[in-house]
Amino acid sequence: MKVIDIILTNEKLSLEKAVDFVRAEQAGGIVTFVGTVRNQTKGKKVIRLEFEAYEKMALSEMRKIAEQILFDFEINSVAIYHRTGNLSIGEIPVVIAVSAPHRKAAFAACEFAMDRLKKTVPIWKKEFFEDGAVWVSAHP
């Protein structure tokens, strides 16, 4: 059975929860992507990030991505989690987990999900530096 789990929250994300959700007897592999807050951008020291979302539309778009990869790739299940609010260096703003009978489909689906998430989901990221801040992702 193919299943989807979508979470948009200001709470800490759990890789373990995503992996547990997609785990299946028919899965030959699970591929995950974990985005982390890095300490620099283009040579500038990052202090923290802030994520904002248009929640209703973001959840809808995240579900569309999951449904599309279920249709386009031979996978069993997918979990797409994104965090909002203020995040410190090293914290996790995004987790994607995909299970599939074969690894190639899982890798391809996971990459597709992350690429599409950045392009179509109304989540905005603000980077804070020692000398100011800038919005760096304004989409769609």
Image: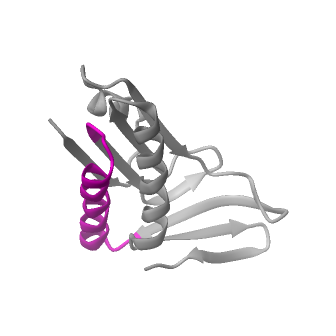
Residue 123 appears in the picture as rendered? no
Residue 58 is situated, as x and y percent measured from the top left of the image, at 32, 68
**Where on the picture, by quarter, is residue 136?**
bottom right
Q: Is residue 62 magenta?
A: yes
Q: In the figure, residue 61 lies in which quadrant?
A: bottom left
Which residue, as the protein is rendered here, is positioned at the far top?
A: 25
Please report the residue visible at 40 percent of the width from the left and 54 percent of the height from the top. 82
* Res. 74 visible in picture: yes
Q: At 46% from the left edge and 60% from the top edge, which residue is drawn?
A: 85
- Residue span colored magenta: 53-77
Q: Residue at x 41, y 39 (%)?
A: 106
Image position, residue 49 (x, y; %): 59, 61
Q: In the depicted view, which residue is nearer to us: 107 or 140? A: 107
Q: Quadrant of the N terminus?
A: top left
**Residue ranking furthest to the right:** 43
What colour-coding does the image apply? one colour
Residue 9 location in percent, x, y? Answer: 34, 54
Q: Where residue 56 sits in the image (x, y, percent)?
A: 24, 70
Q: Is 14 on the left or on the right of 21, as rendered?
A: right
Q: In this view, does 17 lie above or below 131?
A: above
Q: Is residue 136 above or below residue 30?
A: below
Question: Can you say which quadrant of the picture contains the C terminus?
Answer: bottom left
**Magenta stretch: dominant secondary structure:** helix
Q: Nearer the viewer, residue 119 or 87?
A: 119
Q: Residue at x 49, y 66 (%)?
A: 118
User: Does residue 44 appear left or right of residue 84 in this picture?
Assistant: right
Residue 11: say if magenta.
no
* Count of marks, rendered view: 0
